[in-house]
Image (spheres, helix red, strand yellow):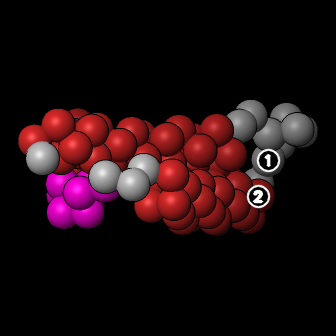
Amino acid sequence: MGGNAAVSAVLGGMIAMASAFAYAWRALRPPRQAGADARKAFQAQVAGEGYKFAVTLLLFAGVFKGYEQLAALPLFLAYAATVVVYWMALLRQQ
């Protein structure tokens, strides 16, 4: 039981990190033109959030389908903890 919970927790943290990477990859790409305006920057952020949401859903679905000994509570707790730590780090920088 403990090993499955640990693997599930690691998977939850990895899902959170992969979704953050997908957001950064899409939202923070350099603009194609030199004078990118605020509307394009906003659209890039919205697209990044869409990528993040899609990656999160796909990875959760893949884990639930592919890992038979999944422990759901550690998976979700580790996911939530990773997201909270990420936001706390961002808030602390300001």
Instruction: State the residue lying farthest toward the right.
Output: 33
> Which residue lies at the image location 31% right of the left edge and 55% below the top edge?
70
| In this view, 87 is above or below 73 | above
Rendering coords of residue 51 (x, y %): 64, 57
| In this view, 43 is above or below 74 | below
> Which residue lies at the image location 59% right of the left edge and 44% below the top edge?
22
Q: Secondary structure at mark 2?
A: helix
**Within-10-Å neighbours for mark 1: few <14, some 14–19, many 20+:** few
**Is there CB contact under 8 Å for labels 2 and 1?**
yes
Rendering coords of residue 40 (x, y %): 76, 58
Q: Which residues are magenta?
A: 70-77
Question: What residue type is disc 1 on?
Answer: Ala
Quadrant position of residue 92? top left
Q: Is residue 71 visible?
A: yes
Question: What residue type is disc 2 on?
Answer: Lys
Indicate which disc residue 36 carries.
Answer: 1
Indicate which disc residue 40 carries.
Answer: 2
Q: Secondary structure at mark 1?
A: loop
Quadrant position of residue 85? top left
- Please tell me whether the stretch drawn in magenta is mainly helix, strand or loop: helix
